[in-house]
Image (tube, rainbow, N blue to C red):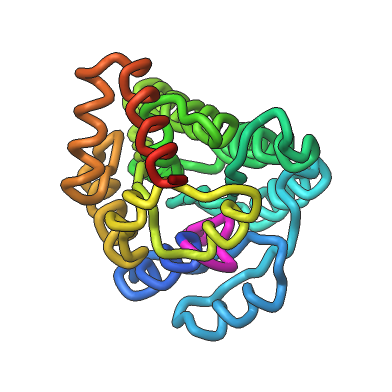
Amino acid sequence: MKKIALITGASSGMGREFALQMDYHFKNIDEFWLVARREEELKALADCLQHPCRIFSMDITKIGQLERLEFALRLEKAKLCILIQCAGYGIMGDFEHADRKETLGMVRLNCEALTELTHRLLPYMTRNARIIFLASSAAFLPQADFAVYAASKSFVLSFGRALGAELKDQGIYVTSVCPGPVDTPFFDRAEKNGSTLAIKKYVMAAPEEVVAKALRDSYYKKPVSIYGGAMQAFCVMTKLMPHGAILSLANILKNAERK
């Protein structure tokens, strides 16, 4: 039975980095299935990998596309050993003036598509399989001017932790990755209508390091992976301080930057 690793959002950023690192370390995988909308970028990635690859150029928010992916697994009678969901995006700026289509698209991709794809593919996973969700440190508390994205990632983190508890007895382990800012093309799109706090730029992480830790934490069956001391401290702070106080502090810092 063919052993498959499936990665969504594989054409760039974190998804691409997961593919590159897994290609080097995961010799027991027979084939990588790379999923994203941009076919040329997927082909370029596949050419860099030693493992055989199958490319799925698709929009996973479309039901028909998900059915196509599920059908391919069923046809192959494959064993899905690793499912990594990196597809997603965020748009900064105040909610009132946000583009409605883009805003709803965040929810559909970051939450709905992730949930449906997981539900469809779970029957093809067996004991000792791994699921990795790309959440965010934005999941730790509400964020003004990043409201929908932060809420969507809170969903991912909560869903991932609950799903991991449900699947533990089946030997399927879920890790939700919660990085802070990562040096990927994410901000090229995210900051088109607004910008993040300047302090976040000082804790920008390299995708190679975030992914390496995520894979280690997944190996050790950890439910959450948080890279870096700054983000780990931030996580603790959001548990100890009232969120209202943190939001007020963030607003003060933002206003100070504008002056």
Residue 101 in the image, given as x and y percentages of width and height: 80, 39
**Image: magenta residue range:** 1-13
The vertical placement of 177 against 139, above or below, is: below
Q: Can the viewer see residue 33 in this picture?
A: no
Q: Answer left or right for 44 relative to 19.
A: right
Residue 135 in the image, given as x and y percentages of width and height: 44, 40
Q: How many marks?
A: 0
> Is residue 176 in the magenta section?
no
Classify the position of the C terminus by image quarter.
top left
Q: Looking at the image, which residue is at 65% across and 57% down?
A: 76
Q: Looking at the image, which residue is at 47% across and 64% down?
A: 184
Q: Residue 145's quadrant in the figure?
A: top right
Q: Answer left or right for 146 relative to 209.
A: right
Residue furthest out toward the front: 259
Residue 198 in the image, given as x and y percentages of width and height: 38, 52
Q: Looking at the image, which residue is at 62% across and 34% down?
A: 94
**Closer to the camera, 156 or 187?**
187
> Is residue 10 in the magenta section?
yes
**Closer to the camera, 251 or 177?**
251
**Closer to the camera, 212 or 191?**
191
Residue 257 in the image, given as x and y percentages of width and height: 40, 46
Q: Residue 113's quadrant in the figure?
A: top right
**Closer to the camera, 96 or 55?**
96
Q: Can the viewer see residue 182 in this picture?
A: yes
Q: Looking at the image, which residue is at 46% across and 45% down?
A: 258
The vertical placement of 94 against 259, above or below, is: above
Q: Answer left or right for 187 relative to 167.
A: right
The vertical placement of 31 against 89, above or below, is: below
Q: Answer left or right for 170 relative to 212.
A: right
Residue furthest out toward the bottom: 47
Residue furthest out toward the right: 64
